[in-house]
C-alpha cells in the first residue's frame, strides 16, 4: 500500500474516537445525585470551551496523534528525502525484519546483538524492580506503621532530597564512586579484599545499581502510601494472637498493599526499561541496553523509520508488562497511576 | 541480648545501608567538587579549590543550556498546568466507560518511556509542519515543550484530581444560588480553592522539565538544554566541574526546601491560631447561651 | 397569597422516584417545614425549588411565575446548605457581600447592606474574620446573613442546625424564628427532627416515601395525625395493629394481639378493615383501671425529673410506654412485677394501615 494514504486515515481515526467518546459520555446513565445538566450549562460557555479545547489539544496533538504517527512511520522504508511520498514509499515490515535478522531483506543470520539487548533489558528491569521492592519494603513499612510522625516527616525530606538532583548527575555520582579508581575500589584495595580494582562499570554492576538508585523513590512512595492506609490495629490484633512477624507480613500486609506493590514495580520497570541517562553514563563499551540502541537508530544511523520501529517494540513490551501485572494482581489502571 | 535489641541493631544496619546507598554517591560527588584533583575523587584530598566552580561558570555551553532549560521549564509550566487542570475537571464530569476510556488515554504518557514520547513528538510535528508548510514550528525548544508537557500535564492532572476530590460541590452550588454565573463560580470559588494545587503542580512541572533528559534528548533536535550538555560532558569524560554543578543544584534545592518549610510552618501556625480563635468563640458562645437560659 | 406553589411535582432518578406527584401552596411570609425521615424526598423538593434539580413532571411557581428553565442563579430563592457551604477563603464580610458582588452592586451600597446584615445577625465586630475562626453559631449566622443579602423572596434551609450540639441547636431555633419574624421572608425548612419542625414552623408537611402525608400546623400533626405514618413519626406513640370488629358512632373496636381496644374512628373505617390504634404515652395511665386496659410486666422506668417513662412488656414481646408527668404519687412497680396501663377512648386514634 502506498504510504501517502496513511496520514489522512490516521487523522480521521482519533476524530472517530472522539465521536464515540462523546456518545458514551452523553448517553451513559449518570450516577444518582449528579446534575443532569449539559456540559455547557454545567461549566458555563467560556470554561466549557476552555475544557474542550485544552483536553482535545492535549489528548490528540500531544498524546494520540504522535503515537499513531510513530506507529505509521515504523512501517515505512528508509528513503532519501526526495523519494518520500513517491512510488517507492510503500508500507513494509523491513524495520521489524531488521530487528530480528540484522538486515532489511536477508533472513540468514539472527540479529543477536539487538535481540539480546532487548531481552536483557526486559529481564534486568524486572530484577531491578524486584530488588527495589525488597530494599524499600522495610523502610516503607517502618515509616508507615512504626515511626513517630515527626521522624516520618524527616525521613520523607531525606528521601526526596536526592531526587532534586537530576538523573544524569545522580548517575554521574555513582560513576565517580564505582569507577576503577573510585572510592569503593580504593576501600576494597585498601582493606585487602581485592588486589585489582573491580570493573563495576564493565561488568554492568554500575548500570544496574544506577537504575535501581534512580527510581527507588517511586517504589518507596508507592509502598508507603498503601501501607499507611493499613489499619495498625490489624497488625496489633495479629500480634496479640501470636502470629510471628513473617506471618504478619506475608498474610496481612502484603495482600493489603498489592496495589502499591504493583504500581511501584510497574513504575520502576517502565522507567528502567526506558531509561537513557543511566545507560549512557554508567555502561561500559560492552554493555547492552535497549534504549541506547534506539537512540543510535536516530542519532547515528539516521534511520528514523527503524528507530520508530524499535521504539514501538519497546513500548509494546512495556504495555504487555503493565497488562500482565494488572492481570496478575487483578487491579485496574487507576490503582497503578495514583 | 533480647530480641528487641536484635531488631534495633538490624534496623540500624539496614538504615545505614539504605541511606548510605542514597547519599553516599552524592556526598562523594559533593566533596570532589572542592578537591584540586582533576579526577573527581574524595580520597586522597589533594587540596581545597573553587576552581571547578569557576570553570563551570565560564562554560558557555552549560550557561547556554541552562538558559534554554529555564525557558523550556517556564513554558512547560504555562502549558501543563492549564492542560492538567482541564484534564482533571473533564475527568470529574464523565462516568463509567467514557471515563475509563479517557483515563487510559490521558494517563498513558505517565507510563510511556520518555524516549518514546520524545520520538513520537518529533515524528508527528516533523510531518505536520512539513505538510502544513509551517516548518518554523519545527524547532527544538518548541518540540521539547510539547514533548515534556504531554506527560507533565498528566502529573499535574493527577495532582488536580486529588485536590478536586476534596472540593465540596455545595460551594459551587452556594455560589450559583447567590446569583453567580458558572464562569464567576469558576474564578471566584473553584480557582482560589485550587490555588495550592496550582502552585505545587507548577513547581512539580518546572522541576520535572528542568531535569528531564529522556524526552528532551530527542525533542531538542539540534539545540541544547542543560541536561543534554551535561550528558555530553559526562560521556566525554569525568571532570569535577560536573560535581560543582551538582553542588550548586543541591545548594539551590536546599535553600528552596528551607524556604518552603518556613512558609509551611508559618501557615500552620496561622491556621492553628484561627482554630484556637474558633474554639475560644465556641466556649464564649456556650457561656452566653447558658447565661441567657438562666435569666429566662 | 401563595408565594411558592408546587404543582403535581414528580422527580425521578433513573427508576427511583424521589418525589411522587406532590402539590402544595406555601404562603407569603410563612415559616414552612418539610418533616420526614432521610430519603423521603424532602431535600429533592428543596433542590427543585432552588433550581438545582429539574422536575421530571409538574412545576414550581414562585410569586406566580413558572420557574421551569430558570437556573438557580436567577431564581428569587436563597439556599442555606446543610454544611452551610461558606466560602472558607473569603472573610465574613466578603461571604455576606458575595451575592451582591456578583450582581454588580456598587461597593458603597454593598458595604452598607453587609453592615446592616452583620448588625441584624449580631456579628458586627466579626466582619474581618475568616470562616475558620468562627464558632458554630457564628457560622450559622453568617450563612443566614449571606442568604438574606440578596433579598430573596424565599429562604430555603436544608437542615442547617444538624451539625450543632444540642444546647446550641435549641438556642438557634429561637434565633432563626426571631430573624424570620423580623425580615418577613418566607422560610422553607427541611428537617428530620420533629422538635425543630414543631417549635419553629407555622405549618409542617410530613413526608414519607416521596409523598406528603399531611400538611398542618404543629398541633394538627401532633394531635390529629391523618395517617399512621404521621402518628408514629411525629412524637412518641404506642401503636397496636389489628382488624376492626365493631363500629359505634364515632368509635370503633379493634381486635389486636393484646386484646380488644376501643378508640376514635375519625377516618370512618369499616368492620373488617386493617387498622392501627395509636395512643400517646402521656395519655396512658399507670395502675388505674379505665376504658381500655392493658397488663404486662414492668420492664424499665426511666426517671427524667419532670417526667418518667415506664416501659411495660406484654405477652407477645412488644413494649408499651407510658409517660407520667409531675412527681408521681405512686411507687414505681419494681422490675419484673406485673403492672397494668389504662387509657381513655377519646385519647386513642384508629388509623388505616
Image (cartoon, coloured by chain):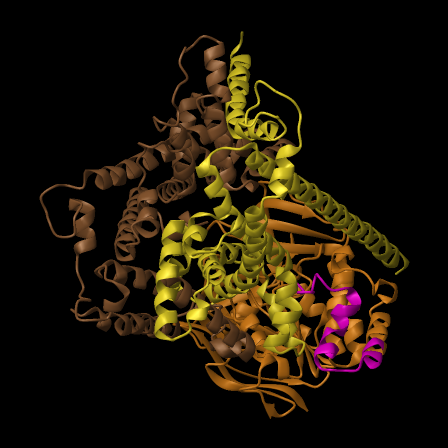
Chain colours: A brown, B yellow, C orange
Vertical position of residue A308 compared to residue C47: above or below = above
Tell whether B216 sits left or right of C290. left
Vertical position of residue C324 compared to residue A64: above or below = above
Residue at 68%, 73% in the rendered image: C219
Tell whether B190 sits left or right of A20. right
Farthest residue in the right direction?
B295
Tell whether C189 sits left or right of B38. right
Q: Which residues are magenta?
A: C83-111
Q: Quadrant of residue C79?
A: bottom right
Is residue C157 in view? yes
Q: Quadrant of residue C134?
A: bottom right
Residue at 27%, 61% in the rendered image: A73
Along the line of sight, which residue is nearer the eye, A157 or C349?
A: A157
Residue at 40%, 67% in the rendered image: A61
Q: Position of residue C270 (x, y in %)?
A: 44, 77
Along the line of sight, which residue is nearer the eye, C63 or B257?
A: B257
Q: Position of residue C141 (x, y in %)?
A: 77, 66
Is residue C234 in view? no
Q: Quadrant of residue B97?
A: bottom left
Vertical position of residue A219 compared to residue A65: above or below = above
Residue A294 is inside the magenta segment: no
Along the line of sight, which residue is nearer the eye, B258 or A25?
A: B258
Q: Position of residue A129 (x, y in %)?
A: 37, 35
Q: Position of residue C138 (x, y in %)?
A: 78, 61
Along the line of sight, which residue is nearer the eye, B258 or C186?
A: B258
Farthest residue in the left direction?
A108
Query: Where the N terminus of chain C falls, by quadrant?
Result: bottom right
How many marks overall? 0
Amino acid at each position: 500500500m502506498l504510504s501517502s494514504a496513511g496520514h489522512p486515515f490516521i487523522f480521521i481515526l482519533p476524530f472517530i474516537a472522539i465521536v464515540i467518546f462523546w456518545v458514551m459520555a452523553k448517553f451513559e446513565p449518570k450516577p444518582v445525585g449528579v446534575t443532569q445538566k449539559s456540559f455547557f450549562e454545567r461549566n458555563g460557555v467560556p470554561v466549557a470551551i476552555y475544557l474542550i479545547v485544552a483536553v482535545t489539544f492535549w489528548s490528540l496533538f500531544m498524546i494520540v496523534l504522535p503515537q499513531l504517527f510513530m506507529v505509521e512511520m515504523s512501517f515505512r522504508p528508509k528513503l532519501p528525502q526526495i523519494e518520500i511520498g513517491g512510488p517507492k514509499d510503500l508500507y513494509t515490515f523491513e524495520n521489524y525484519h531488521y530487528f530480528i535478522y540484522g538486515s532489511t531483506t536477508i533472513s540468514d543470520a539472527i540479529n543477536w546483538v539487538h535481540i539480546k539487548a532487548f531481552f536483557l533489558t526486559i529481564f534486568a528491569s524486572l530484577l531491578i524492580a524486584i530488588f527495589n521492592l525488597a530494599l524499600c519494603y522495610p523502610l516503607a513499612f517502618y515509616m508507615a506503621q512504626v515511626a513517630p510522625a515527626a521522624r516520618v516527616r524527616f525521613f520523607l525530606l531525606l528521601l526526596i532530597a536526592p531526587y532534586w538532583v537530576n538523573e544524569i548527575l545522580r548517575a554521574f555520582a555513582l560513576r565517580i564512586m564505582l569507577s576503577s579508581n573510585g572510592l569503593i575500589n580504593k576501600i576494597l584495595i585498601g582493606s585487602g579484599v581485592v588486589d585489582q580494582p573491580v570493573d563495576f562499570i564493565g561488568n554492568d554492576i554500575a548500570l544496574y545499581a544506577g537504575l535501581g538508585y534512580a527510581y527507588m523513590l517511586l517504589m518507596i512512595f508507592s509502598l508507603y502510601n498503601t501501607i499507611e492506609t493499613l489499619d495498625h490495629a490489624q497488625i496489633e490484633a495479629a500480634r496479640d494472637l501470636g502470629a510471628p512477624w513473617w506471618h504478619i507480613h506475608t498474610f496481612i500486609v502484603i495482600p493489603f498493599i498489592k496495589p502499591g506493590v504493583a504500581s511501584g514495580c510497574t513504575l520502576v520497570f517502565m522507567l528502567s526499561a526506558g531509561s537513557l541517562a543511566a545507560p549512557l553514563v554508567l555502561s561500559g563499551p560492552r554493555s547492552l541496553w535497549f534504549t541506547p540502541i534506539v537512540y543510535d537508530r536516530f542519532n547515528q544511523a539516521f534511520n528514523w523509520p527503524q528507530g520508530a520501529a524499535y521504539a514501538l517494540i519497546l513500548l509494546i513490551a512495556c504495555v504487555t508488562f503493565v497488562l500482565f501485572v494488572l492481570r496478575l494482581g487483578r487491579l485496574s489502571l487507576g490503582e497503578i497511576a495514583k | 541480648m533480647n530480641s528487641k535489641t536484635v531488631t534495633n541493631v538490624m534496623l540500624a544496619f539496614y538504615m545505614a545501608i539504605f541511606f548510605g546507598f542514597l547519599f553516599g554517591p552524592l556526598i562523594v560527588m559533593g566533596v570532589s567538587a572542592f578537591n584540586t584533583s582533576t579526577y573527581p575523587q574524595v580520597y586522597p584530598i589533594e587540596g581545597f579549590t573553587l576552581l571547578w566552580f569557576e570553570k563551570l561558570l565560564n562554560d558557555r555551553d552549560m550557561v547556554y543550556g541552562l538558559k534554554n532549560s529555564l525557558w523550556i521549564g517556564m513554558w512547560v509550566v504555562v502549558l501543563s498546568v492549564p492542560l492538567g487542570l482541564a484534564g482533571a475537571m473533564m475527568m470529574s464530569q464523565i462516568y463509567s466507560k467514557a471515563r475509563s476510556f479517557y483515563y487510559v488515554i490521558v494517563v498513558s504518557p505517565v507510563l510511556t518511556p520518555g524516549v518514546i514520547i520524545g520520538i513520537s513528538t518529533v515524528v508527528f510535528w516533523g510531518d505536520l509542519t512539513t505538510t502544513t508548510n509551517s516548518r518554523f514550528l519545527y524547532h527544538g525548544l518548541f518540540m521539547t515543550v510539547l514533548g515534556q508537557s504531554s506527560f507533565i500535564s498528566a502529573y499535574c492532572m493527577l495532582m488536580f484530581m486529588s485536590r478536586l476530590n476534596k472540593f465540596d460541590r455545595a460551594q459551587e452550588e452556594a455560589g450559583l444560588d447567590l446569583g453567580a454565573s458558572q464562569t464567576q463560580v469558576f474564578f471566584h470559588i473553584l480557582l482560589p480553592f485550587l490555588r495550592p494545587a496550582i502552585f505545587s503542580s507548577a513547581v512539580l512541572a518546572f522541576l520535572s522539565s528542568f531535569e528531564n533528559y529522556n524526552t528532551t534528548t530527542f525533542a531538542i533536535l539540534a539545540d541544547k538544554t542543560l541536561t543534554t550538555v551535561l550528558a555530553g560532558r559526562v560521556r566525554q569524560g569525568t571532570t569535577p566541574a560536573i560535581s560543582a554543578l551538582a553542588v550548586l543544584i543541591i545548594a539551590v534545592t536546599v535553600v528552596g526546601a528551607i524556604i518552603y518549610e518556613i512558609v509551611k510552618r508559618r501557615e500552620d501556625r496561622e491556621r492553628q491560631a484561627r482554630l484556637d480563635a474558633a474554639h475560644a468563640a465556641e466556649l464564649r458562645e456556650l457561656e452566653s447561651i447558658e447565661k441567657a437560659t438562666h435569666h429566662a | 397569597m401563595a408565594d411558592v406553589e408546587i404543582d403535581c411535582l414528580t422527580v425521578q432518578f433513573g427508576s427511583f422516584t424521589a418525589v411522587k406527584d406532590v402539590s402544595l401552596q406555601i404562603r407569603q411570609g410563612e415559616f414552612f417545614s418539610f418533616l420526614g425521615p432521610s430519603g423521603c424526598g424532602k431535600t429533592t423538593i428543596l433542590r427543585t425549588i432552588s433550581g438545582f434539580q429539574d422536575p421530571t413532571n409538574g412545576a414550581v411557581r414562585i410569586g406566580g411565575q413558572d420557574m421551569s428553565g430558570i437556573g438557580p442563579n436567577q431564581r428569587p430563592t436563597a439556599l442555606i446548605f446543610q454544611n452551610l457551604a461558606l466560602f472558607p477563603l473569603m472573610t465574613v464580610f466578603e461571604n455576606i457581600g458575595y451575592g451582591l458582588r456578583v450582581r454588580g452592586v456598587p461597593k458603597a451600597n454593598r458595604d452598607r447592606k453587609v453592615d446592616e446584615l452583620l448588625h441584624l445577625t449580631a456579628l458586627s465586630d466579626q466582619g474581618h474574620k475568616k470562616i475558620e475562626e468562627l464558632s458554630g453559631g457564628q457560622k450559622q449566622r453568617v450563612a443566614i446573613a449571606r442568604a438574606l443579602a440578596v433579598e430573596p423572596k424565599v429562604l430555603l434551609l436544608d437542615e442547617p442546625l444538624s451539625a450543632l450540639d444540642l444546647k446550641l441547636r435549641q438556642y438557634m431555633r429561637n434565633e432563626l424564628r426571631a430573624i424570620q419574624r423580623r425580615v418577613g421572608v418566607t422560610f422553607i425548612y427541611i428537617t428530620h427532627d420533629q422538635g425543630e419542625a414543631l417549635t419553629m414552623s407555622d405549618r409542617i408537611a410530613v413526608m414519607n416515601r416521596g409523598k406528603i402525608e399531611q400538611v398542618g400546623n404543629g398541633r394538627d400533626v401532633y394531635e390529629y395525625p391523618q395517617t399512621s405514618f404521621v402518628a408514629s413519626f411525629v412524637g412518641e406513640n404506642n401503636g397496636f395493629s389489628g382488624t376492626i370488629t365493631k363500629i359505634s358512632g364515632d368509635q370503633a373496636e379493634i381486635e389486636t394481639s393484646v386484646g380488644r381496644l376501643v378508640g376514635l374512628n375519625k377516618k370512618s373505617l369499616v368492620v373488617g378493615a386493617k387498622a392501627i390504634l395509636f395512643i400517646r404515652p402521656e395519655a396512658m395511665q399507670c395502675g388505674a383501671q379505665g376504658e381500655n386496659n392493658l397488663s404486662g410486666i414492668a420492664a424499665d422506668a426511666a426517671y427524667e425529673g419532670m417526667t418518667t417513662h415506664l416501659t411495660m412488656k406484654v405477652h407477645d414481646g412488644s413494649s408499651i410506654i407510658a409517660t407520667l408527668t409531675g412527681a408521681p404519687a405512686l411507687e414505681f412497680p419494681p422490675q419484673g412485677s406485673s403492672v397494668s396501663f389504662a387509657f381513655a377512648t377519646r385519647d386513642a386514634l384508629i388509623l388505616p394501615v
